[in-house]
Image (tube, grey):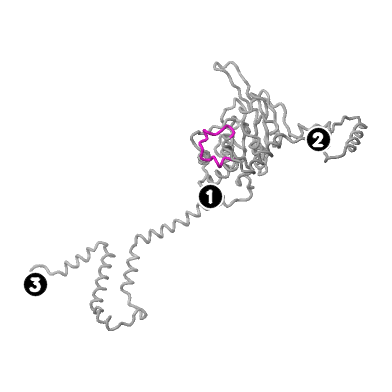
Amino acid sequence: MEYAIETFSLTKIFSDWWGRTKVYAVDNLDLQVRPNEVFGLLGPNGSGKTTTLKMLLGLLHPTKGKALLLGGDGTDPKINCRIGFLPEESYLYRYLNARETLDFYGRLFGLPSKVRKMRIEALLDMVGLKAVANRAVGTFSKGMARRIGLAQALINDPDLLILDEPTTGLDPIGTRQIKDLVLKLAERGKTILLCSHLLADVEDVCDRIAILYGGKIQTQGHVRELLQQTNKRQITTDAISDTAVEKIKQLVREEDADCEVTSPMDKLETFFIRTVTAAQQQAQPTSGAVSTTKIGDFLTQQKAVESILDKLVSAPIAKQGSVETPKLEKVAAVESPGPKADEQLLSKLTRSAEPSEFKAVTKKEKVETEPVESQTRRQEQVRENILDRLTDGSGTKSQDKDKTEKPQAGDSGDA
């Protein structure tokens, strides 16, 4: 698979009710996204970004052209089960709580119960909503709803992740968390297609970008190559004396170039996160989302390393069935004895006693012991009853025997 996403002259035309006015939302789009790449799809409102994503996922039928995802059609269930999608607006069932919402999406992907439970807890912890997991999502703020939307996009551990405005409504800590997550997923080998209006976020995480306008690609390439100013130089040093600064300026003037020396500044995002982190370390209470730096283990493990959980939910299923079946058969055999069990019982009853089974008998026990003839008669009677059960199972044979042995009326008189 050369490309994770590839489009061929992808076009979408919208027309009015009468079919007269035509709007080219996407116009002959040729896009290639490589595997294990974070690709940013940028552009102003109405440039065709969301329309492109919907055509990739099969939610919109293109007017012409074709799109391939992971080497196949995005509408194929075998392909879309490997895709995670976070839409621009989170469409959630407002009466389900956070844990039930993730369980619902896990069931749609056919995940086993143990896997769903493990991933749900890991994702809730990752997006910082574990403390409010039993609240209905209809009561969540927009930022908290986006966090749940991101969790549902990751519940199936996708190979391709498509994010449409993932940081909309999130606080700066949540935004940083999303960026860290994207970088972690890229390290694992996943492919991410990202649409966002926050260009600073795209700059931090994307390998390549494409800028759309009027449904067409205006430019694309590596972020570093597009943004780097090759006609300027930047030097960063530790704190130096004013004398050293003047010497540097003098050297720069000798090169007929301008020079400006200033102190570097932190980004406001960095300063904000540092302040809030200090408040969290003091365990100050909050009713909102709790930002963490944890990433679900199932999202950060390398695919080459097979986890114990994968072994439990895949191969051992058949193995467990093969072990449990003989046990059930064995129990059934014990509960419903057949002819062999009767024969074993008969042999135990009729076998001769071993010498070790005899024990010394006192005088008192000799008096209370039954005569040998009565014991022999009882054993013969038990033997006859068991033989009758083995022959016909209903005891009819013994009844017929009794009838033949009982003298008929008038026989004694004749005798």
Left or right: 150 as drawn, with respect to 396: right
Image height check: is 149 above or below 337?
above
Helix, strand, or loop for circle 2?
A: loop
> Where is mark 1, residue-wise?
313
Residue extending furthest toward the bottom: 363
Helix, strand, or loop for circle 3?
A: helix
Residue 130 on the magenta segment: yes
Helix, strand, or loop for circle 1?
A: helix
> Where is mark 3, residue-wise?
412
Disc nearer the start of the sequence (2/3)? 2
* Circles 1 and 3: CB atoms closer than 8 Å: no
- Mark 1 surroundings within 10 Å by alpha-carbon count, few (fewer than 14), some (14 through 19), many (20 or more): some
Left or right: 211 as drawn, with respect to 287: right
Locate residue 390, reporting x and y percent. Answer: 29, 65
Q: Quadrant of residue 222?
A: top right
Q: Can residue 67 be seen in this view?
A: no
Q: Which one is closest to the eye, mark 1 or mark 2?
A: 2
Locate residue 176, reporting x and y percent. Answer: 66, 37
- Mark 2 surroundings within 10 Å by alpha-carbon count, few (fewer than 14), some (14 through 19), many (20 or more): few
Q: Observer-nearest residue: 166 or 115?
A: 166
Q: Is residue 409 visible?
A: yes
User: Label 1, label 2: how many angstroms apart (C-alpha)?
Assistant: 57 Å
Image height check: is 346 above or below 277?
below
Image quarter of the N terminus: top right
Left or right: 375 as drawn, with respect to 44: left
Q: Which amino acid does label 1 sit on?
A: Val
Q: What residue type is labelled 3?
A: Ser
> Where is mark 2, residue-wise?
263
Q: Which one is closest to the eye, mark 1 or mark 3?
A: 1
Locate residue 297, reporting x and y percent. Answer: 61, 47
Q: Quadrant of residue 181?
A: top right
